[in-house]
Amino acid sequence: MRVFPRGTIAVVGNAPTETGLARGAEIDGHESIIRFNNFQLAGFEADYGTRTTHWASAFYPDIAPRSENFQRILCTTPMLDERFIYYHLDPANHSLPDYAGLVTAIQARNNVEIVPYEIIRKIGIRSAGLTVLAWIYFERGRTLNGVFLFGFSFFDKAKPHHYFQDIAPVVGENDHNGQEEKELFELMIKGKL
């Protein structure tokens, strides 16, 4: 089963690289639009658009639950405890079912996809953005044709990581290796990952 449609995909990271460029309409013009973790649209529509079809998240405790009706929800951490996923999919329900009920509840949502572990074996634990790019790359037969990136900076440690926050990251706060992620991305562009 395909997770990503065959049409164009806007993969919209949270880096402030689109700020002031008024590319929101361009982003919204793609068939599918993937956004990550705690993305925000209100106040940023001109630069980052208004549509979201896929929400990708690592579902760590600092990721806020969302109530939007996404076509697909992508979990970028395959070994995550299902209770975290359930909480993020149903924030109004604060009473978690027992484990068997939990698994049934997650499986009943046919729009939830968890990254195949084979991808993690190939790229290691990476940011949600790079994990989704690798997922698309392998699903599309080792190509990123039709995939358009917005809001990616490969974690410039001197700048804020998110367009919706003005604060620079704390040293040691982000464990993503921007240089390694950039190199993996370049291998994908060349079809050599």
Image (cartoon, rainbow, N blue to C red):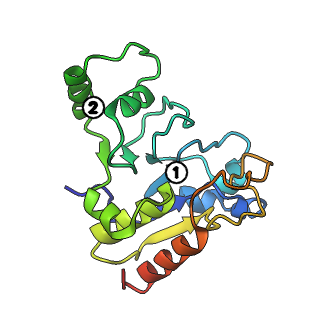
Q: Nearer the viewer, residue 15 or 12?
A: 15
Q: What residue type is labelled 2?
A: Ile
Mark 1: secondary structure: strand
Measured as percent of width and height from the top left, residue 114 is found at 31, 48
Of residues 98 and 19, the one nearer the viewer is 98
- On residue 35, the disc is 1
Q: In which quarter of the image is residue 8?
A: bottom left
Q: What element carries label 2?
A: helix
Labelled disc at residue 24: none
Density class for disc 1 (Cα within 10 Å; few <14, some 14-19, many ≥20) is many
Q: Which residue lies at the image location 40% right of the left edge and 77% below the top edge?
A: 145
Q: How many marks?
A: 2
Residue drawn at x 42%, y 61% is: 131
Which quadrant of the figure has residue 157? bottom right
Residue at x 45% of width, y 69% of height: 147
Residue 141: where, in percent of width, then height? Answer: 27, 75
Q: In front of the other: label 2 or label 1? A: 2
Q: Position of residue 6 (x, y in %)?
A: 32, 65
Per the rendering, the mark at residue 106 is 2
Asked if residue 29 is positioned above or below residue 54 in the image, the reply reads below
Q: How far apart are marks 2 and 1 (CA)?
A: 21 Å
The earlier-in-sequence mark between 2 and 1 is 1
